[in-house]
């Protein structure tokens, strides 16, 4: 991200220690396939030692509120969107790895669309940039208690995720799991090599554009105009989570790995 030079002593020391720990490990677990591939490619470590186990998500964390009938406003909707406009929502950390330039420029092009409300929920270093560029049909909302996660996501019609172009194989935005659990279509702004993009395309659960592609983000129009497609994408998103990204699956993979590495646990596990 350009915050620390690779030639700096701090970076070189961290890299040396990090690689040493990895090489001394029996297994290296990454939370995304792209991360696992990068570790093998850049650290000289055998692919047999590296695997990906997605974080996974327990849909009970969003509860029934997230999947409730959106025509019946919940308390979050009543508070922030009483007119029941179409909500395009960004909820979560507004950190350095989540650029907002493309999103805010695209929002400006929709500023005159009275059907739409852009919600930006959360905090972080980029919050003031969002505030300074908030369109007239946008609202900036503080972090909400975790107990409101379900009704917060239920209030969205389309969910936004932003990731720095260089982070595609170094991180995977955790918020995507909650969005899928809530059955909402996703618009991802980031590198096309991200694993999220593959999920969106293969399972038809959303759209993806590159950072800087403001014209491409006009694809929002397609979802704003088509409530049926939003509904179908949302159903497919929840099905994807239940099929491949559920927390129970992640727990099972971790248990299998522990049994493999610690044979004496096998009988207890069985």
Image: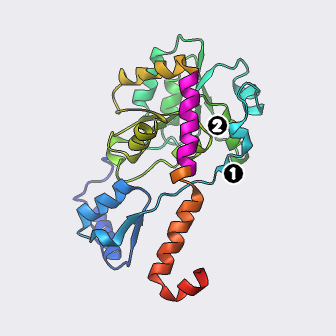
Q: Nearer the viewer, mark 1 or mark 2?
A: 1
Location of residue 84 (image quadrant):
top right
Q: Is residue 36 visible from the viewing direction of this image?
A: yes
Q: Is residue 117 left or right of residue 34?
A: right
Q: Position of residue 106 (x, y in %)?
A: 43, 21
Region of the chain picked out in magenta, as a range: 228-242
Relative to 117, residue 21 above or below: below
Relative to 12, residue 98 above or below: above
CA separation, marks 1 and 2? 13 Å
Residue displayed at 32% across by 44% down: 193
Residue displayed at 64% across by 50% down: 59
Location of residue 102 (image quadrant):
top left
Q: Nearer the viewer, residue 150 or 93?
A: 150
Q: Residues within 10 Å of mark 1 (few under 14, many from 20)?
A: few
Q: Which residue lies under the disc numbered 1?
A: 60
Q: Residues within 10 Å of mark 2 (few under 14, many from 20)?
A: many
Q: Which residue lies under the disc numbered 2?
A: 153
Location of residue 235 (image quadrant):
top right
Q: Nearer the viewer, residue 93 or 227?
A: 227
């Amino acid at each position: 991200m350009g915050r620390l030079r690779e030639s700096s002593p701090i970076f070189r020391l961290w890299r040396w220690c990090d690689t040493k720990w990895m090489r001394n490990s029996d297994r290296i677990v990454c939370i995304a396939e792209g991360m696992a591939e990068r570790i093998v490619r850049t650290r000289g470590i055998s692919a047999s030692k590296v695997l990906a186990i997605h974080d996974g998500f327990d849909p009970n964390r969003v509860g029934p509120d997230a999947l409730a009938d959106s025509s019946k406003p919940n308390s979050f909707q009543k508070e922030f969107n009483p007119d029941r406009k179409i909500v395009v929502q960004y909820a979560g950390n507004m950190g350095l790895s989540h650029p907002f330039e493309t999103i805010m420029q695209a929002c400006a092009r929709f500023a005159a669309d009275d059907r739409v409300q852009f919600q930006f929920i959360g905090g972080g270093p980029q919050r003031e940039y969002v505030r300074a560029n908030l369109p007239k049909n946008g609202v900036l909302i503080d972090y909400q208690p975790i107990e409101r996660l379900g009704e917060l996501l239920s209030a969205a019609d389309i969910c936004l995720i932003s990731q720095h172009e260089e982070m595609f194989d170094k991180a995977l935005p955790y918020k995507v799991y909650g969005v899928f659990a809530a059955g909402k279509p996703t618009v991802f702004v980031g590198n096309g090599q991200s694993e999220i993009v593959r999920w969106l395309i293969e399972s038809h659960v959303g759209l993806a554009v590159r950072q800087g592609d403001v014209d491409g983000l006009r694809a929002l129009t397609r979802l704003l105009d088509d409530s049926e497609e939003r509904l179908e994408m949302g159903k497919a998103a929840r099905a994807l989570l239940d099929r491949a990204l559920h927390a129970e699956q992640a727990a099972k993979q971790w248990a299998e790995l522990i049994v493999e590495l610690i044979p004496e646990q096998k009988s207890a596990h069985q």
